[in-house]
Structures are given as structure tokens and as C-alpha cells.
């Protein structure tokens, strides 16, 4: 039996006294009656009414205290040379007592009435240097889309979809209470993140006032734990990346045959451009320099890139100081197969370093100072162009016009790139030369430092505390470029035998090429942010009444040097929160924000944004006791409130200062006089100030259910509705005849409705002693609609966007392909830039006027590229020392368009293989062909290049995102990971999530090692 001593135990021989306090780790409340014993001995003490204790321990080394209390996890703490040990116990009920990060504070999950999703940082870990690439399907309520697979590229993400068309639609992102950018977030390693919270409804975001309309992401980094030994964690990874679903193009001989066919099908009887002799020479590859057949994709892009990542972090603490330090290094290489011709290697080669240092010092028992520092350093090398431009060139450059380069000849000091003229002295584009002849290096530095002082005022009244925060964030980038003009050559006409072209002569194109590298000036840009914040908190329990409150003042000053902009952008505001619960059954919360910025005139700069929420924990009612063994927790919650956005109008290029009239002097006038020799000029109005301007406002409603079954199955479901109004827009309904010309007035009158529901489930089962299973699912559905666009009065209803989705697709309704000239003659005239022939696309005449023109464009789908549905599901199994995990994510109710893919034209563009495989021909007039009748020029095929249902595709997909297999040993773990393993979609031609010309997503195989000491 345990012999319990009184806390006034007299110190015995060779013993000393240790004192301290035992508190709840979630909210800091004292724990009464906790058992504190010396490990291996049978004596101990219990904590008193204030959680305090005092215990005698032997003076020898290796003494450890064991602390236990019903409902909390046991904790062991080495005594070492400590005299005061303050102990925080964590609940063993992770559902009811889990701590949730809320705006500028924390709450127990059981008492949260707002809609908040929270995950651990390691749940977002993926073999990628881009944290945001792992959002899709893992966070309920978040819609994330990827637009590029380029190393370091961030995904686009929205909380509960898009609810505005006037300004920023992405969420506010806060790192340890300080705003950061999407790029900053993207570079943070998952190992550094303790928790990742998504604030979705008005109750959760109201304290951010005019900045909370799009939701808020809260990232909390890890900290050291008091009275704990130093822990060292090391992770090293090496990944192998290969492009997925790279578009395929037709070979040279096929291109020439289809070119001839395009000539003849539009101009019968014309002599084909390419002879059979040329086609045969190209197909047989008799001489790749005389008869080139270039596969630009294979030539320019590698089959694999190899990347490395390492993370080292150290954490621990004593009774006074805790610390967490992390260093993360990412080395990413690209897929460009660039030759080493000059003094640079312009394949993508990025080195990124991320430092995180969090230090806490307890000055007194009631005063603590936190110093957080996040430093991001990037050294980025690559070509001086957008990779999308290079991918687009694989379409612009066909396989037969010229080879990528010619063999060097004796005495050459330069590369002989192939090329030819389009017309006159205008060269075509050689993607290989374009890739090889430029270089850019950028050096980026971000320093984000926060000093925070926390002071408890229990000596005034228990539960009262305050904190003050000052933050300095600075970003700077310097970049320089190098380039050289390439030498272009072509095979001289008549210099080879067409049947046996073993020899040929080259001629230089014009004066192309230089021998000297040019270097651009060093470009410098920077920005800096200073944030000040003061917060007063109160949290106390009176019997069954639990009362909490928070008041906060914040001001932010942001200044950038881009475009020589000397004026800072400033935010300032007060916000507050009041919480009350009775017996953890009846919950109430009120939040408000009173915020403003300098964009509006005095008197209009500040607005008040309130929100309230209610919750009922049904499972804590006495009548629910019989169901407790089945339903551990059941809570219904609802919220209603108003939040805002101070970045309204920016997408539509509204000015920063909305209240200022802008004029230009002497820029407009008239000419008159007898000989038209007199000109008079006067002022010109660029912009009229917005009268009584205000912020976008969002009225949000949410109702949700939190359910926990069998102590191992968590379910959350929410329905939400948002009405966004006061969106800043141009008065589009006002005609130019009113005399505003380009200075069309602005007004806060745009409106959007946005609604949907979301669901998440996490199930854990300990199947046997050695085998456990976790199953998780997330599902998000969002839908939006324009309510007021101030549209002009259109002749036909189908031309309006009001009442339709923000992502809706518009164009012509295709009715298949014309099958005969008779059908064309009996159909409405299609005045779309070319004369239709059999095999061309036929469109519907919506207004019945006998003509197909812009009046016949209409809504062709309520869906667009941004999905309405996003979901994810995964399974984790652990058996003894082995672990196995899979995860899938998907997007649905989504449409994409096949665009920018048309062959030939004035620049002799390339041909996609899917076109070569299935196009309409006179010999095979397939009415369901993937591509209509061929043609060479815009004047013959403009009819077929209109946006229409013919080019619209089902963009739904399911992605096999992750597979991981690991093995744990005494001090670590080794694992293999596959990422982006497969994608299943009705669309087969390239990755349905990307445009064809974007840097492709990669299939990644990763091997990693984790060590823990």
C-alpha cells in the first residue's frame, strides 16, 4: 500500500525537499489530490486545494517522480538538481479534454462552440518541400487545388469554398499569433508544427473582424516541455520523382501527313507541302539533321529528379526554461534536362533552409517570456523564364522544322542550334535553345521574430492574466540573370541528296548569336511588417459555472519596396471574447472585432463585427447516463455572426485608397482651328472616390454535431450558409453615355451566397495486443451563387451570371459535327471567323435569329475548375513494429476545358497524340471524333476554336495520394513512401488537375530514416 505523507513532512537524513504545483495541461487549472511519489519507493504526497505539493526525496542521483491522477496520463519527471518542479498533466480522454487552438487562445474541445478543425502537424507530412500540397482531402472544410508540380509551388486553398469575386478569397494565416503569407506557410516543415487549426464560422473568426471573412488558419509550432530531458529527433529522406501523365505528341512523319491532309481538306487539288520522299526520310530517320523528327518533351525533360530533405530538432526544459529548436533543409532539383554549355546549370536547383527556435523563460512563478523565431532562407537557381512557357513551346515547335542542334564543327566555339524563319527575318522558337541560354539566381530571406510576455494576475483575482506581443517580420530577395543570344543554323537548300542525305551544308540565320554572356542588374525587393498586440484574459470556475473572457488590441504596419511604394498598409483594431458554460453542458460564446484600415475615409474606417454561438453537450445530461457506454460525447452547436474583408475590390484592380479622386492633368483634349492646328488639353478623371465606402461583410450561419462513439470513433458534421455582401464592384449597369468613360464609379453592392456541408470521421480500434487500426475520412461540399453583379440589361436571360455559380462555365452549345454540306445549308449561319465545312462543329442557335454569334453564348455548366466536392479517406495499420498507411483524395462536380491545343496555325504548331488518334476525316467521317476537321489557318478553323461543350470534359478524379510502410526499432524508424502514385479520372489525356502546359505533378518514391534520442 502507498503510505501518504502530509505535505509538511520533515526532511530526513540525506534527503531534500522538492516543491511544485500540479495543473491541467489544457487550461492551467490546479489539480487537487494528484499523487506524487518517488519511483521505486512506497512513500508520497498528494497535491492540496491549490495543486501545490512538497515532497522529500533522497539526494542520490537518478531519482524520478511519478505523478498520477484519475482521468489523466501518468507522468515521470527526473528530479536531477531541481528544487521546484511544476507539473502539467494531460487528460487520458483525448476527445473530451483535447486542447483546441482558437483565435488568440485555447479551449478544451468539449467547450468549443465554433466550427474548428484541428489536426497534428505530422498528419500533413508528405515527401514534398511544399506543405500545402498535402491539404487536399485531409482537412474538412478546406478546398485545395494544385496548379503546378514545380518544386516549391504552393497549392491554392480556400476555407469552405469561394464566397467573393471582388477581392482576396484565401484565408488569413497566423503562425503563433502573427500573420504570414502562403509562401511562408508552404516552407514550414510538418515536424515543426504542433497543431494546425482551421477556423471556419463567424464565432471562430469574428475576433479578426475585417480580416476573417475567408476563414483563418492557425499554425502553432512546437515548444519544449517543463522538467523534461532533452529530446533529439533526426529525419533524413531521399526521394525519386518522375513526371506523371506528360502529354504525348505525334511523330514527325505523322505531323507531315496530317499537315498535307489539312491542306487538301480545306483546299482540294492543292499540291501538298511535304512530298512522300520527305515523309519517308523522316519516318526512317535516315538523317536526323536533314529530316529531323524531334520529340521535344523527351529531349527537354528528364525521366527522374532526385531530392533530399533533412530535419533535426531538439526540445526539452527545466523548471525555468523550455526550448524547441529545429533546422530543416530541402534540396529540390527539377526535371529540365539542360546541357552544360555555359558557365551555369539552369536546371531547377533549390536549397531551402528553415530554422525554428522557441524559447520560454519563467522569470517568476507568474511571469513568462517567450521568444519565437522563424527564419527561412532560400537559394533558388534555374532558367530565367516561366517553366509554363517552356512547356507551351513543346506545342509551338513541331518535330520537323529543325533539329534542336547540329553537330559542332572543327573550330566552333559555340553551340549550333537549329532554327528556321517563320516569315521575313522572324525566327521560330527553339525550346532547347530557349531552355539553355538563360539563368537566374534568387536569394530569399525571411525573418519572423516574436517576443511575448505573459503575466498572471492571480494576486488580483484568480484566473486573470495578460500578455503583450511585439513581432518583426522582414522579407528580402535579391536576384540576377545571365543570358546569351544563341547561334541559329539551318541546312542550306540544295546542299544534300534527298534520297541519300549523308552530307549537307549549314548556313547561319542572319546575324544570330553572340560569344559573350550578358548579366542583368541585381534586382532587390523587400517588405517588412511590425505587429503589436496586447491581450487581457480571464478564466475561472465557480462551482459548475465556468467563465472566460478576452480583450485584445492589435495594430499591424506593413510596408513594401515593390514598385517604389513608400506608403505602409496599416490595420488596427480591438476584439474580444466572452465564454460561459454551466457544468460543461450549456455553452455560450460571444466574439467581436472592431477593426479598421486606412483604405477608407475617416469616419468609415472602422466597423464592428459581432458573432455568438451556443452549444449543448447532451451527453453530460443526467438522463444520458444509460447511453454513456456507447456515446461518450454528443454536442450540438450553432453560431451566427458577421465578419468582414478589408481587401475588397483588389481582384477588380480597385485602388488602395478608395476615397481619393484621381486626376491626370493635360492628358486629354481636342484639336480645332481653321487648319486643325490648335490643340487644347485639360484634366482627365482616372477614378472617382467611393462615397460612403465600406468593407465586404459576411453573415455566416453554422450548425454542427460533434459525436464520439465507443471512446474510439469521432464524428463531426456541419452545415453552413454565408451571405457575402458589400462587395466592391464597378457600376456595370451604368452606360458609358453617362460620361464616366474609363472612370466608371465603384460601389459596395456585389453579393454572393455560399453554402454547403462537411463531414469528418476518425476511427481507432485496438484489434489485438499487437494490431491496431485507424480509419479517417473527410468530405466537403460547397456551392456558391452570384446574387448581385450589377449587370447591364442583356437582350437574353442566358447571358446573365446572376443566380449562377462563380465557377460556372460559359460558351456555345455544340450539337456535334456537321456531316454534310446540306446540313450546313439548312442550319443557322455560323459567323465565328471561318466558313464551316462538313466535320466542323455545329452550334445551337439559342435566340432563333438564324445566326450563330455572341448572343448564343450561354451557361454550359454550373461547374468549373474549382471542385464543389473534395474528399479524402485513409487507413493506418500498426502491427508490432511495423506500420502501414494509405491515403486517397479526390475532387468531384468539376469541369475542365481542352484549350490551347489546336495544331498548325501560322506558326505550324505541334499535334497532340490524342488528336492524331481520333480526328474527323473525309475518309472516316466519325461524328463522335475527339477533334473536328483539320485546317491550317485561323481563317479556316476559327469556328472550331470557340469555347463550347465540344471541348468541355469531366474533370473529376480520385488520386492515390500516399502509401507508406515503416518499421520501428529502439531509437528510430525506417520507412518507404510513395506519393502521387496514380490518378483515376474519366479524362485521360493529361493530369486532370493541371493545365497541359503546367509543370507536371510527379510520382514520388521516398526512403526515410528517423532517429530519436
Image (cartoon, grey):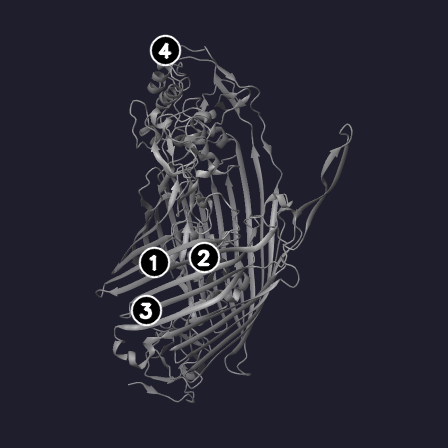
- Looking at the figure, which quarter contains the C terminus? bottom left
Q: Which numbered disc, 3 or 4, marks the residue that appears first in the sequence?
A: 4
Q: Examine the rendered structure and indicate whether residue 912 appears above or below residue 881.
A: above
The numbered mark, 3 or 1, whose residue comes first in the sequence reads: 3
Q: Earlier in the sequence, mark 1 or mark 2?
A: 2
x and y percentages locating residue 767 in the rendered image:
22, 64
In the rendered view, does 365 fall on the left or right side of 337? right
Left or right, residue 386 beside residue 42? right
In front: 828, or 175? Answer: 828
Do the residues under discs 3 and 2 have CB atoms within 8 angstroms? no
Q: Residues within 10 Å of mark 3 (few under 14, many from 20)?
A: many
Q: In percent of the image, x 32 and y 65: which residue is there?
A: 715
Label 4 Cα crowd, 10 Å radius (few <14 / some 14-19 / many 20+): few
Q: Nearer the N terminus, badge 4 or badge 1?
A: 4
Q: Residue furthest left?
A: 768
| Cα–Cα gap, marks 3 and 4 | 79 Å
Q: Residue 273, position in %: x, y?
A: 41, 16
Q: Which residue is mark 2?
A: 753
- Residues under numbered marks 1 and 2 in contact, where contact means CB atoms less than 8 Å apart: no
Secondary element at image label 4: loop
Image location of residue 24, percent across then percent down: 41, 76
SS class, disc 2 = strand
Of mark 2 and mark 4, the one earlier in the sequence is: 4
Q: Is residue 243 above or below residue 1013?
A: above
Instruction: Give the foreground label among 3 and 4.
Output: 3
Kindly report the distance in space between the C-alpha atoms of the residues bearing marks 1 and 2: 23 Å
Give the number of the mark in front: 3 or 2.
2
Question: Can residue 102 be seen in this snapshot?
Answer: no
Q: Which residue is label 1 attached to? A: 778
User: Quick one: 200 or 534, which is closer to the camera?
Assistant: 200
- Disc 1 vs disc 2: which is toward the camera? 2
Amino acid at each position: 500500500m502507498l503510505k501518504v505523507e502530509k505535505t509538511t513532512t520533515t526532511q530526513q537524513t540525506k534527503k531534500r525537499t522538492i516543491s511544485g504545483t500540479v495543473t491541467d495541461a489544457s487550461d492551467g487549472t490546479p489539480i487537487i489530490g494528484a499523487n506524487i511519489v518517488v519511483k521505486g519507493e512506497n512513500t508520497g504526497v498528494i497535491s492540496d486545494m491549490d495543486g501545490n505539493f512538497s515532497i522529500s526525496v533522497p539526494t542520490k542521483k537518478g531519482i524520478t517522480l511519478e505523478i498520477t491522477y484519475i482521468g489523466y496520463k501518468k507522468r515521470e519527471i527526473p528530479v536531477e538538481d531541481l528544487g521546484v518542479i511544476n507539473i502539467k498533466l494531460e487528460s487520458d480522454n483525448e476527445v473530451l479534454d483535447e486542447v483546441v487552438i482558437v483565435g488568440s487562445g485555447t479551449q478544451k474541445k468539449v467547450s468549443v462552440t465554433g466550427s474548428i478543425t484541428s489536426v497534428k502537424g505530422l498528419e500533413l507530412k508528405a515527401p514534398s518541400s511544399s506543405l500545402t500540397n498535402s491539404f487536399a482531402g485531409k482537412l474538412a472544410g478546406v478546398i485545395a487545388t494544385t496548379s503546378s508540380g514545380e518544386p516549391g509551388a504552393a497549392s491554392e486553398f480556400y476555407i469552405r469554398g469561394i464566397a467573393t469575386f471582388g477581392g482576396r478569397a484565401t484565408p488569413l494565416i497566423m503562425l503563433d499569433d502573427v500573420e504570414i503569407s502562403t509562401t511562408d506557410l508552404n516552407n514550414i516543415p510538418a515536424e515543426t508544427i504542433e497543431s494546425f487549426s482551421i477556423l471556419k464560422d463567424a464565432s471562430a473568426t469574428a475576433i479578426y473582424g475585417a480580416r476573417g471573412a475567408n476563414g483563418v488558419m492557425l499554425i502553432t509550432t512546437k515548444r519544449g516541455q517543463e522538467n523534461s530531458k532533452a529530446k533529439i529527433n533526426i529525419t533524413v529522406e531521399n526521394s525519386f520523382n518522375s513526371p506523371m501523365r506528360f502529354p504525348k505528341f505525334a511523330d514527325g512523319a505523322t505531323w507531315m501527313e496530317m499537315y498535307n491532309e489539312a491542306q487538301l481538306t480545306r483546299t482540294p487539288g492543292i499540291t501538298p507541302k511535304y512530298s512522300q520522299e520527305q515523309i519517308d526520310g523522316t519516318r526512317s530517320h535516315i538523317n536526323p539533321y536533314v529530316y529531323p523528327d524531334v520529340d521535344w518533351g523527351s529531349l527537354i525533360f528528364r525521366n527522374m529528379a532526385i531530392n533530399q530533405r533533412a530535419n533535426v530538432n531538439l526540445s526539452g526544459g527545466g523548471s525555468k526554461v523550455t526550448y524547441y529548436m529545429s533546422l530543416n533543409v530541402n534540396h529540390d532539383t527539377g526535371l529540365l534536362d539542360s546541357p552544360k554549355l555555359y558557365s551555369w546549370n539552369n536546371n531547377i536547383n533549390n536549397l531551402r533552409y528553415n530554422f525554428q527556435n522557441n524559447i520560454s523563460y519563467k522569470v517568476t512563478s507568474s511571469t513568462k517570456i517567450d521568444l519565437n523565431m522563424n527564419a527561412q532562407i532560400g537559394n533558388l537557381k534555374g532558367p530565367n523564364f516561366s517553366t509554363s512557357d517552356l512547356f507551351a513551346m513543346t506545342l509551338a515547335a513541331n518535330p520537323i522544322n529543325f533539329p534542336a542542334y547540329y553537330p559542332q564543327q572543327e573550330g566552333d566555339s559555340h553551340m549550333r542550334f537549329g532554327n528556321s524563319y517563320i516569315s521575313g527575318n522572324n525566327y521560330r522558337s527553339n525550346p532547347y535553345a530557349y531552355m539553355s541560354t538563360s539563368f537566374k539566381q534568387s536569394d530569399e530571406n525571411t525573418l519572423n521574430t516574436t517576443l511575448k510576455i505573459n503575466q498572471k494576475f492571480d494576486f488580483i483575482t484568480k484566473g486573470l492574466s495578460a500578455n503583450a506581443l511585439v513581432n518583426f517580420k522582414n522579407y528580402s530577395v535579391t536576384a540576377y540573370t545571365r543570358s546569351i543570344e544563341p547561334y541559329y543554323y539551318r541546312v542550306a537548300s540544295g546542299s544534300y541528296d534527298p534520297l541519300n542525305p549523308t552530307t549537307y551544308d549549314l548556313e547561319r540565320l542572319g546575324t544570330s548569336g553572340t560569344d559573350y554572356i550578358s548579366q542583368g542588374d541585381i534586382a532587390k525587393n523587400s517588405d517588412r511588417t511590425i505587429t503589436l498586440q496586447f491581450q487581457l484574459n480571464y478564466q475561472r470556475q465557480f462551482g459548475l459555472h465556468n467563465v472566460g473572457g478576452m480583450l485584445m488590441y492589435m495594430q499591424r504596419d506593413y510596408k513594401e519596396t515593390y514598385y517604389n511604394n513608400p506608403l505602409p498598409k496599416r490595420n488596427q483594431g480591438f476584439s474580444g471574447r466572452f465564454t460561459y458554460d454551466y457544468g460543461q453542458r450549456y455553452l455560450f460564446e460571444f466574439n467581436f472585432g472592431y477593426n479598421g484600415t486606412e483604405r477608407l475615409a475617416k469616419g468609415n474606417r472602422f466597423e464592428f463585427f459581432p458573432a455568438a454561438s451556443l452549444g449543448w453537450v447532451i451527453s453530460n445530461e443526467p438522463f444520458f447516463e444509460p447511453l454513456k457506454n456507447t456515446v461518450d460525447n454528443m454536442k450540438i452547436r450553432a453560431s451566427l455572426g458577421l465578419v468582414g474583408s478589408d481587401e475588397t475590390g483588389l481582384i477588380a484592380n480597385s485602388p488602395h485608397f478608395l476615397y481619393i479622386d484621381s486626376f491626370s492633368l493635360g492628358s486629354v483634349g481636342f484639336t480645332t482651328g481653321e487648319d486643325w492646328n490648335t490643340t487644347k488639353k485639360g484634366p482627365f478623371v482616372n477614378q472617382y472616390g467611393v462615397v460612403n465606402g465600406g468593407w465586404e461583410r459576411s453573415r455566416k450561419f453554422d450548425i454542427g454535431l460533434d459525436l464520439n462513439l465507443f471512446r474510439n470513433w469521432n464524428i463531426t458534421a456541419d452545415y453552413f450558409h454565408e451571405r457575402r455582401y458589400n462587395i466592391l464592384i464597378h457600376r456595370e449597369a451604368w452606360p458609358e453615355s453617362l460620361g464616366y468613360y474609363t472612370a466608371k464609379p465603384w460601389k459596395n453592392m456585389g453579393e454572393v451566397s455560399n453554402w454547403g456541408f462537411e463531414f469528418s470521421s476518425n476511427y481507432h480500434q485496438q484489434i489485438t495486443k499487437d494490431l491496431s487500426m485507424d480509419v479517417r475520412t473527410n468530405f466537403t461540399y460547397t456551392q456558391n451563387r452570384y446574387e448581385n453583379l450589377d449587370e447591364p440589361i442583356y437582350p437574353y436571360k442566358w447571358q446573365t451570371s446572376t443566380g449562377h455559380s462563380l465557377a460556372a462555365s460559359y460558351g456555345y452549345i455544340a450539337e456535334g459535327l456537321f456531316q454534310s454540306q446540306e446540313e450546313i445549308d439548312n442550319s443557322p449561319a455560323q459567323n465565328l471567323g471561318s466558313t464551316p465545312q462538313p466535320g466542323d462543329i455545329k452550334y445551337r442557335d439559342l435566340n432563333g435569329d438564324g445566326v450563330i454569334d455572341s448572343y448564343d453564348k450561354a451557361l454550359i455548366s454550373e461547374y468549373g475548375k474549382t471542385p464543389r466536392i473534395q474528399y479524402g479517406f485513409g487507413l493506418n495499420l500498426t502491427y508490432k513494429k511495423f506500420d502501414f498507411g494509405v491515403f486517397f483524395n479526390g475532387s468531384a462536380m468539376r469541369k475542365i476545358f481542352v484549350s490551347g491545343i489546336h495544331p498548325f496555325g501560322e506558326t505550324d504548331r505541334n499535334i497532340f497524340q490524342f488528336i492524331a488518334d481520333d480526328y474527323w476525316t473525309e475518309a472516316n467521317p466519325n461524328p463522335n471524333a475527339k477533334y473536328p476537321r483539320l485546317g491550317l489557318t485561323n481563317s479556316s478553323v476559327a469556328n472550331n476554336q470557340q469555347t463550347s461543350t465540344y471541348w468541355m470534359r469531366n474533370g473529376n478524379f480520385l488520386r492515390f495520394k500516399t502509401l507508406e510502410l515503416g518499421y520501428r526499432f529502439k531509437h528510430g524508424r525506417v520507412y518507404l513512401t510513395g506519393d502521387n502514385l496514380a490518378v483515376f479520372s474519366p479524362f485521360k489525356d493529361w493530369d486532370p488537375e493541371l493545365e497541359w502546359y503546367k509543370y507536371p505533378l510527379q510520382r514520388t518514391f521516398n526512403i526515410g530514416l528517423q532517429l530519436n534520442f
